[in-house]
Image (cartoon, helix red, strand yellow):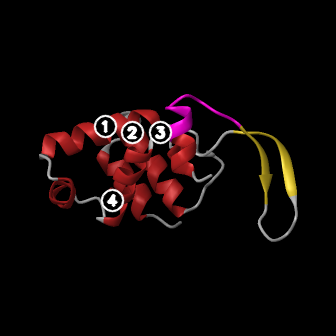
Amino acid sequence: MDWQELTDLTRGQPFVVERVRLAGSGVAVEGQFEPPQLAQLGADDQVFVAAFVRSHGSIKEMERIFGVSYPTVKSRLNRIAERLDFVEQLDIADTGPASASAEVVDRLRRGEIDVQQALAELEGPR
């Protein structure tokens, strides 16, 4: 069974995977695992997300591929984004350069620092 069959079978209802077998090694793990959020999307939405990534996020290209308008693409992206919350679940312990920069931008957005302070932190030694 592939993911598309599984998402068709579940019709968008939450499901749990209880057994995972590593192909070729004979190793199997049993428990309760939630599938990745992208796998929980319907097949049509999975195709849409894949096309968006392959088009490098170009809404103009998405309009061309799917033959729909800009507002339609944006609306569908917004609807899909509402189902994906893994960005908020990222581990705060990641303190690499990208994470540090993102934290500075977040603090700026929240009004905790001003633009000058943010620029100084972003340009400072890492």
Kindly state the secondary structure of the residue where label 3 is placed.
loop
Measure the C-alpha gap from mark 2 to mark 1: 5 Å
Please name the amino acid that badge 2 sits on.
Ala
Q: Residue drawn 33% across and 34% down?
A: 79
Regarding residue 86, the answer to whether it shows in the image is: no
Pinpoint residue 17: horizontal percent, then vertical percent: 72, 41
The segment highlighted magenta reads 8-16
Measure the C-alpha gap from mark 4 to mark 2: 15 Å
Question: Taking 51 as reference, is 11 left or right?
Answer: right
Measure the C-alpha gap from mark 1 to mark 4: 15 Å
The answer to whether mark 3 and mark 4 are in CB contact below 8 A is no
The front one of 23 and 49 is: 23
Q: In this view, does 28 lie above or below 19?
A: below
The answer to whether mark 2 and mark 1 are in CB contact below 8 A is yes
> Nearer the N terminus, badge 3 or badge 4?
4
Residue under label 1, please give it: 78
> Nearer the N terminus, badge 1 or badge 4?
4
